[in-house]
Image (cartoon, coloured by chain):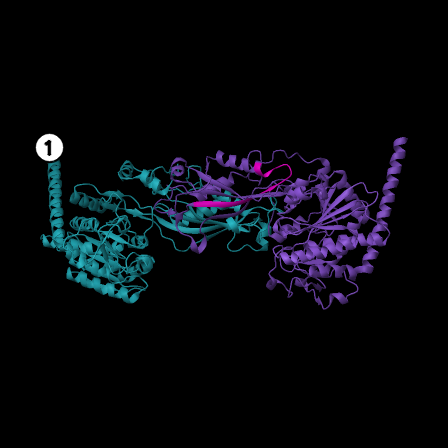
Chain colours: A cyan, B purple
């Protein structure tokens, strides 16, 4: 009986919370509808300040401008000086809040090649009625527009990546305030000025500013939402380490007629070596490569299966008839580390080809890491595998002595820039809280991504801080991120304000 | 008893023939010693006429000059016009001769890049006291030299390849004449003006000039003698066919993070495909690749074993610890066809590498052919092998329909320039006659090469003529053939006159 009462109470509380969030959604949407032109103007003003990380005077202008934007919302703001560009840092305390959220966005953008853009200047935002490559027309004057349609787009560098999430976040606070509400957590915000340059100053800054960076959860607003346009929550990202694997042949290419069959061919040996690393189904056969990766729990399985995957469309787009047999589903494929040959070279192919046995053959390889697999460990396993195939691993160019001693000689050159994976357990209470907040706000569960297949430069920062992190990507997936004609679909932008308001009230 | 008498007679005849050839050698050597400056002058004059195949006015000057040289020896000469450069043709009938030799040399040379040479002009011959890279000094005035040392060298384009054999051959006739002897065969000589351009007009010329080209044996004077400097007779050369093998991946490179493990990787598939074509010992596993190649007979085995092979030195030079396990001996290695990966490319390696699954991967491959293996047949077998690995072979770039239908798509682009192998049976009576003539002249068996590992452009001509051919290479192996600083060691040149005189008396 007691338990039944508790259940009824809990259900009632949930229903009530859901109802409250639904009201929130309506309130915020109404506010956005009434304040569209003001919110878009704030974005356009921010986009008008050039923000390539190397352009330090303009980066400083961005930082100062952002300081003003944050201060207008009551944040106490500091520009945290680093070895590189300043971090814009703000704090907003909420009476009675028992937890702190660290909100992360970045204010720098990718370099631009203006000649490739369909507008004069990537830092003079242009409003269009749709995608420019699908007939979207230029609207003459953004400032004069009162109401914006959801399919209209703002074209400018960083429109999506990653200035609009900053503006949406502050608009969400404005909307909450307008409806007499406030965030339910203490807020700390950190705006990175070097993300597109790999965030080199972020981890070093922790030592100096650790006290300001403490929180219970980091929320990262960056990247595109799922292509279904549904709200999206991401719990992790794969890491990466890259290396070149070279197999040596004769000191210089030798005549393939005079010596063909007799002198071992390094291109063929590299081919065999690479072939030895994968089974026919595409799974890695390097001993221990998947060690530590437990089978998915039923809950994890359900999480992956719930991701809407339009595999057919993707395969058609790529012109591929079938995925790798060992990884038939994309969501499963990204749960495992990869060993990917991203490039091959040996002598020449095509018009430049000569009839030789080449002197060497090299494969450029990237390993995508997951939470359970660390870069150095997998590199050691690859080295052991190469040795087990009979190779001597040379540190540099093999000298005559090494050449005389070893029949098979290879070299592994590891790129020192290693990013490990991060993954917050999807059932972590704070991760659940974010998901629930989004679900209650929209009345439907968000797309939940256990891990991105790609790598985010912020992973080492998450690693170093030591508390959980969740990515909430909000912009349209077709935003031309990093390319010319970067753009933001306004419907995504307006919905982001609602999603963020929901999360701020979580 | 009768047989014994016959044996004694035969031995006596052989002893007598050997004695006669030994006298011949001494006569020719004496003649050469007395006529060095005249022979070298004739060579120098010929070398002074530029002879790149594309330089048609100078090619014509060479042809006219050669006409004069042949006419002075009593040849009836014609310039046979072809679709390209003229063939210089001469005929010298010998009363009572019962067989005809077709003597082949070429008078064109490789293109030159004078800036890379250590002399001002590759067509102004320079006499040096040794190899220029080993301290050989320039002799100021070739014309003023009375006696030449064996280790001195003439530096000029075509000094070795292939003008000196022409001059040596005519000097051999002069030497025979001076000692009151003549060739024992009717002679036909054909001097090719396009060998370094692949002899494109040679086979087409047969239709027009067949009557002039009939003979019992072709003797080809081209290429370097064995590195031991011993007289060398070669019975064949491998052929060649080249092709590019491409494995297709996604239409364009895709992100190795977002899609790694899921989208099949064409570089890895190419590696596996190449690996499937060779066993661990380096032998080709394509079904039927070695079909028709009979095991060596004891005589063939003995022939191969008699070739002086300085494997240790060669391996050391190349910086290779051990040969391919399946072909431990070089002479055996060249008796079999090859399947040699001469180049590999897929996306990029090194600084230009990107984190992608490449769109394609290509291997440039050459197949060296032997007499028993024809190009089209081996290509068909490779195609069958690729198909047996599950590949659809696309004729061109695969379209969307092909991409949707086939998981594995490859393409084979065959270079149309195919040269089949030639090999005259080493026990053919005329091949034996050449070997015997050289052996009797020098008092020692020549190095006998069952087949060169490389390919000679003249092979299709031999094929089309249909009578046996033997190569007698006479110049030094370190002649920088095809490169800058081409040179001729005079000791080799003078000995070539003796060898050729012996063969002309065979």
Residue located 85% across and 42% down the image: B14
Kindly tell me whether residue A384 is visible in this rendering: yes
Is residue B273 rendered to the left or right of residue A402? left
Residue located 57% across and 36% down the image: B377
Image coordinates of residue A90 in percent, x first then y, are 20, 60
Q: Which residue is mark 1?
A: A1
Kindly tell me whether residue A214 is visible in this rendering: no
Q: Tell me the magenta residue range.
A: B360-376
Residue A142 lies within the magenta run: no
The residue nearer to you, when weighing A164 against A421, is A164
Q: Residues within 10 Å of mark 1 (few under 14, many from 20)?
A: few
In the image, residue B12 sits, relative to residue A190, either above or below, namely above
The residue nearer to you, when weighing B192 against B14, is B192
Please, which chain is the residue tagged with disc 1 on? Answer: A
Which quadrant of the figure contains the N terminus of chain A? top left
Report which quarter residue A110 is drawn in: bottom left
Image coordinates of residue B340 in percent, x first then y, are 56, 44
Report which quarter residue B205 is drawn in: top right
SS at circle 1: loop
Is residue A178 rendered to the left or right of residue B288? left
Residue placed furthest toward the bottom: B140
Residue located 46% across and 53% down the image: A413
Residue located 75% across and 56% down the image: B69
Image coordinates of residue B483 in percent, x first then y, are 62, 57
């Amino acid at each position: 009986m007691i338990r039944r009462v508790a259940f009824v109470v809990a259900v009632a509380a949930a229903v009530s919370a859901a109802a409250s969030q639904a009201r929130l959604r309506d309130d915020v949407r109404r506010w956005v509808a009434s304040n569209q032109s003001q919110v878009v103007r704030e974005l356009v003003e921010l986009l008008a300040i050039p923000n390539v990380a190397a352009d330090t005077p303009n980066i400083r202008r961005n930082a100062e401008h952002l300081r003003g934007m944050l201060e207008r919302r009551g944040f106490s703001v500091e520009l945290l000086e680093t070895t590189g560009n300043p971090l814009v840092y703000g704090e907003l305390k909420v009476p009675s809040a028992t937890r702190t959220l660290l909100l992360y966005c970045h204010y720098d953008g990718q370099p631009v090649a203006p000649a490739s853009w369909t507008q004069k200047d990537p830092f003079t935002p242009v409003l269009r009625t749709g995608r420019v490559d699908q007939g979207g027309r230029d609207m003459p004057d953004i400032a004069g527009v009162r109401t914006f349609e959801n399919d209209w787009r703002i074209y400018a560098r960083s429109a999506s990546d990653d200035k609009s999430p900053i503006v949406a976040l502050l608009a969400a606070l404005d909307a909450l305030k307008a409806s007499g509400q406030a965030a339910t957590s203490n807020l700390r915000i950190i705006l990175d000025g070097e993300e597109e340059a790999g965030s080199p100053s972020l981890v070093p800054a922790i030592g100096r500013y650790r006290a300001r960076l403490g929180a219970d959860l980091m929320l990262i607003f960056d990247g595109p939402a799922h292509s279904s346009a549904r709200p999206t929550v991401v719990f992790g990202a794969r890491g990466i380490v890259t290396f070149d694997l070279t197999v040596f042949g004769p000191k210089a290419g030798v005549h393939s007629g005079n010596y063909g069959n007799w002198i071992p061919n390094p291109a063929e040996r590299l081919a065999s070596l690479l072939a030895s690393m994968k089974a026919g189904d595409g799974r890695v056969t390097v001993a221990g490569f998947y060690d530590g990766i437990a089978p998915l729990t039923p809950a994890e399985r359900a999480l992956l299966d719930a991701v809407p995957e339009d595999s057919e469309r993707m395969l058609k787009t790529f012109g591929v008839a079938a995925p790798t047999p060992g990884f038939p589903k994309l969501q499963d494929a990204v749960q495992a580390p990869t060993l990917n040959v991203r490039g091959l070279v040996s002598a020449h192919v095509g018009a430049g080809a000569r009839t030789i046995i080449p002197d060497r053959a090299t494969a450029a390889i990237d390993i995508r890491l997951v939470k359970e697999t660390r870069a150095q460990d997998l590199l050691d396993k690859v080295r052991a595998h190469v040795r087990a195939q009979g190779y001597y691993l040379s540190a540099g160019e093999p000298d005559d002595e090494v050449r005389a001693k070893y029949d098979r000689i290879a070299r592994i050159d590891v790129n020192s820039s290693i990013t490990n994976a991060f993954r917050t357990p999807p059932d972590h209470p704070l991760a659940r809280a974010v998901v629930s907040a989004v679900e209650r706000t929209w009345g439907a569960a968000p797309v939940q991504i256990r891990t991105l297949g790609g790598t985010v430069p912020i992973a080492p920062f998450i690693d170093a801080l030591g508390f959980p992190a969740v990515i909430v990507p909000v912009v349209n997936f077709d935003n031309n991120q990093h390319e010319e004609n970067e753009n933001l679909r306004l419907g995504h932008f307006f919905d982001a304000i609602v999603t963020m308001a929901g999360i701020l009230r979580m």
